Amino acid sequence: MPSYRAPVEDFTFVFEDFLKVYDNKDLPGFDMLDPETVDAVLTGAGKVAEEVWAPANLPGDAEGCVLENGVVRTPSVYKDAYKAWAEGGWSSVGADPQWGGMGMPGIISSAVTEIGVSSNHALSMYFGLTGAAYSAIAGIAPQEMKEMYVPKMVSGEWCGTMNLTEPHCGTDLKLMRTKAEPQDDGTYRLTGTKIFISGGDHDLADNIIHMVIAKVPGEDGKLANDLSTVNFFLVPKFLVNPDGSLGERNGVSVGSIEKKMGIKGSATCVLNFENAVAWKLGGEPKVKKDADGKERKSSSAGMAGMFQMMNMARVGVGMQGMALASVAYQNAVEYTKERIQGRSLTGKKFPDQAADPIIVHPDVRRMLMTCKSFVEAGRAFTMYLNMEFAKARAGREDAKGDLGMLLTPVLKAYFTDMGFECTNMAMQCFGGHGFVHDNGMEQFVRDSRILPIYEGANGVQALDLVGRKLLGDGGKAYNDYVDLIESFLAENKDDAGVAIMAPALQRGLDDLKTATQWLFDNLAQNPENAGGVSASYLRIFGVVTLGFMWAGMAKSAQEALDSGDGRQSDDFYKAKLVCARFWAEQMMPETASHLMKMQGGAEVMMELTADQF
Ligand SMILES: Cc1cc2nc3c(=O)[nH]c(=O)nc-3n(C[C@H](O)[C@H](O)[C@H](O)COP(=O)(O)OP(=O)(O)OC[C@H]3O[C@@H](n4cnc5c(N)ncnc54)[C@H](O)[C@@H]3O)c2cc1C
């Protein structure tokens, strides 16, 4: 059975050496952070993850979820594990204290989330979606609704879901058919079918609060063919009485649950809404006039709340890629130190054994290094972005404006592609023993395969990067980002740590600039170029971004080694420098090949007729 150890030392390095979190007391919630408190949170969550959640992962996968008499039963090992996390307060680390949370900044709650996902991805889904749902309610619902729902969701007594997808409507939400009809009392009645709803029903919580998007019919009773009448609704499984107790069952039922490749302990449900009582969140869309005088409806507060929930979820899903790569890597390291096969190419390393452990082989190390250097830079980037979100919220002068928005699709898509690649490599380290169920490695691969699909498939994330995030503001956020990296390289041109990465990072950045210019030069003449090259463009962005992280971390590691003041061992810091070199030598060159692919454009992809495939 696989095991898990919370990477507390690495979090500590990121917080203290790299991001200097404790020098930022002015940021919201950062005043409550000190090394002892943060250690206590990470080791506390880590203990439940290591001792309760990780042991429930393999049995949860084997047992899966079942639908019995209209009710979903989760794996039997989940009940106590769910309780242990909720009662320990690990699901509410980042929630506002007025709702019963600890009120810690996102940088800490993200670390706890990573620990949860690594130890048990499927189980963590119930908390992840609940967090997204209660954040939306706390953000945009009227006060009495916040008071009615949020504290019970923060405590884990109730759960939440996110309902977008319908049978005929996945990526293209305009096709949605679920309708919400207004009632005289201000509520709505919601009718339609949503599919693939994670945690749509289960036996872990007393009530489930569904956050649903649906269309309000026009005066002719018809649904518009666009997003103009789409709104965001709250639909509880059980209606809630004014005193907070549970009332009658609402018109929501489970049609079926999916039999699927991975995350088998996470119930993926078809939900049928039949005249379900629903409350609309947020106000009406404002009507604005374009420069050409055309009227255009802006998003309502409800839709803005939904987009906020989706953005949070995208960052969360990206992080899941890194978290699964992390646990798969940990297990691969243990195995490759024990499994003996063949001899080192430079002569026997363990002459008293029949063979050397497979960690002596360069190809095995290539796989381990890919995982290690992705996971550690990925963790650093997640925390870096969290700091940027906090700076932006605080309106601090050094906040990098739209960096978070620009990089959200990169985080979602690059991290989940790499998450799958790394779980695969970690499984490969086990040879045939990785392919069998009981070692748990094939489960990590299966579980990670959903990540590039849900929360907006990765192809669509790449289009979002090119279409909205790059071109949407005429390249402003992108230019700011390039300036940021170039300024960092210029300011640190004599730094011994940064020097490890600097030439490769500069080459990668030059490739990114050439790629961006290519997009500006080639999209107008053939719009299909955007779709044909965006995946490569996003990959270049991802590789450069983690190269930037490695340059920063190499600087911090070198400083700690030079000063001797760091909290970690010299070996720990030296390993950081080696990983930076690995990223420079083995990963950065990817930018050149992806640039070449982009320069071919989309033409060859569009050449065949559909019948020729
Ligand atoms: C296990 C699981 C859990 C899920 N949980 C939830 C949940 O909790 N709530 C929820 O609402 N949904 C959920 N989903 C749904 C998920 O978000 C969708 O599956 C996903 O958004 C893709 O939609 P689709 O499956 O209909 O694929 P399609 O939209 O049919 O897309 C198929 C392929 O075509 C590509 N494609 C589609 N349109 C374009 C385009 N315009 N340009 C380029 N490429 C395109 C896509 O990238 C994709 O590769 C879940 C799905 C699964 C499998």
Image (tube, rainbow, N blue to C red):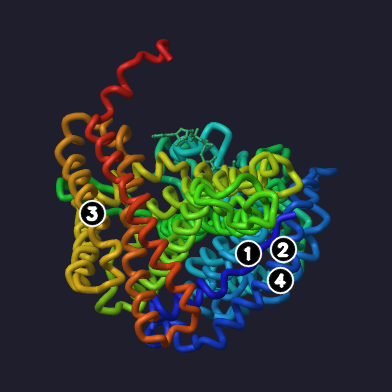
**Dot 4 corresponds to which residue?**
48
Residues tagged 3 and 4 counted as in contact (Cβ below 8 A)? no
Q: x and y percent of residue 537 in the render? A: 30, 43
Report the front residue among 504 and 32: 504
**Dot 1 corresponds to which residue?**
116
Quarter holding the N terminus is: bottom right
Q: Residues within 10 Å of mark 1 (few under 14, many from 20)?
A: many
- Amino acid type, residue under disc 4 in the picture: Val
Q: Residue 232 vs residue 509: left or right?
A: right
**Dot 2 corresponds to which residue?**
53
Q: Earlier in the sequence, mark 3 or mark 2?
A: 2
Q: Earlier in the sequence, mark 2 or mark 1?
A: 2
- Amino acid type, residue under disc 3 in the picture: Leu
Task: Quote the CA–CA distance across marks 2 and 4.
Answer: 6 Å
Q: Is residue 606 above or below residue 267?
A: above
Q: Quadrant of residue 127?
A: bottom right
State the SS at label 1: helix
Q: x and y percent of residue 324 in the render? A: 58, 55
Residues tagged 2 and 1 counted as in contact (Cβ below 8 A)? yes
**Dot 3 corresponds to which residue?**
509
State the SS at label 3: helix
Residue 170 visible in image: yes
Q: Earlier in the sequence, mark 4 or mark 1?
A: 4
